[in-house]
């Protein structure tokens, strides 16, 4: 929870977090609770509008800049596509796959 959130709003939200009907009623009675949920979602904390916080596996998909084969996802961002990976790139100079 961020330090600038009202503790009373946070405790009110915690009380109704597991009950969607109670959460909706609390939101209608006090719209500021939506701001608390939004702040929680940004911080990756619960309770938030999604109902819970999912485990993050983002680190598994972030390529390392030191890894020569950081990803197998195709990219148009090769510095010089004509020279990159001549053994597999059909656009590379001297490629086995190059069409004449």
Image (cartoon, helix red, strand yellow):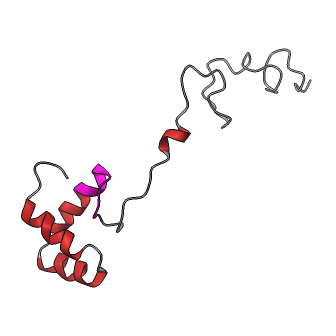
Q: Is residue 63 left or right of residue 50?
A: right
Q: Report the quarter where the C terminus lies.
A: top right
How many badges with numbers are in the image?
0
Please state the extent of the stretch shown in magenta in the rendering: 39-48
Residue beneath the point at 12% across and 79% down = 29
Report if residue 38 is visible in the image. Answer: yes
Residue 36: percent from left, percent from top: 19, 61
Query: In front: 68, or 18?
Result: 18
Residue beneath the point at 61% across and 19% down = 79
Residue 56: percent from left, percent from top: 45, 49
Q: Is residue 87 left or right of residue 27?
A: right
Residue 45: percent from left, percent from top: 29, 55
Is 44 magenta? The answer is yes
Report if residue 32 is visible in the image. Answer: no
The image shows residue 26, relative to residue 98, as above or below, that is below
Q: Is residue 42 left or right of residue 72?
A: left
- Image-quadrant location for residue 86: top right
Residue beneath the point at 83% across and 21% down = 87
Query: In front: 56, or 83?
Result: 56
- Image-quadrant location for residue 49: bottom left
Q: Is residue 83 left or right of residue 68?
A: right
Is 50 magenta? The answer is no
Residue 1: percent from left, percent from top: 20, 53
The image shows residue 54, relative to residue 16, as above or below, that is above
Residue beneath the point at 66% across and 17% down = 80
- Image-quadrant location for residue 60: top right
């Amino acid at each position: 929870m961020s330090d600038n959130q009202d503790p009373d709003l946070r405790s009110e939200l915690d009380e109704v977090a597991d009950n969607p009907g109670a959460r909706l009623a609390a939101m209608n009675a006090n719209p500021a609770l939506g701001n608390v949920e939004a702040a929680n979602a940004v911080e990756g904390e619960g309770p938030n509008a999604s109902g819970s916080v999912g485990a993050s596996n983002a680190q598994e998909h972030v390529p390392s800049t030191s890894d020569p084969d950081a990803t197998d996802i195709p990219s148009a961002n090769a510095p010089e596509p004509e020279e990159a990976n001549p053994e597999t790139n059909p656009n590379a100079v001297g490629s086995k796959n190059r069409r004449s």
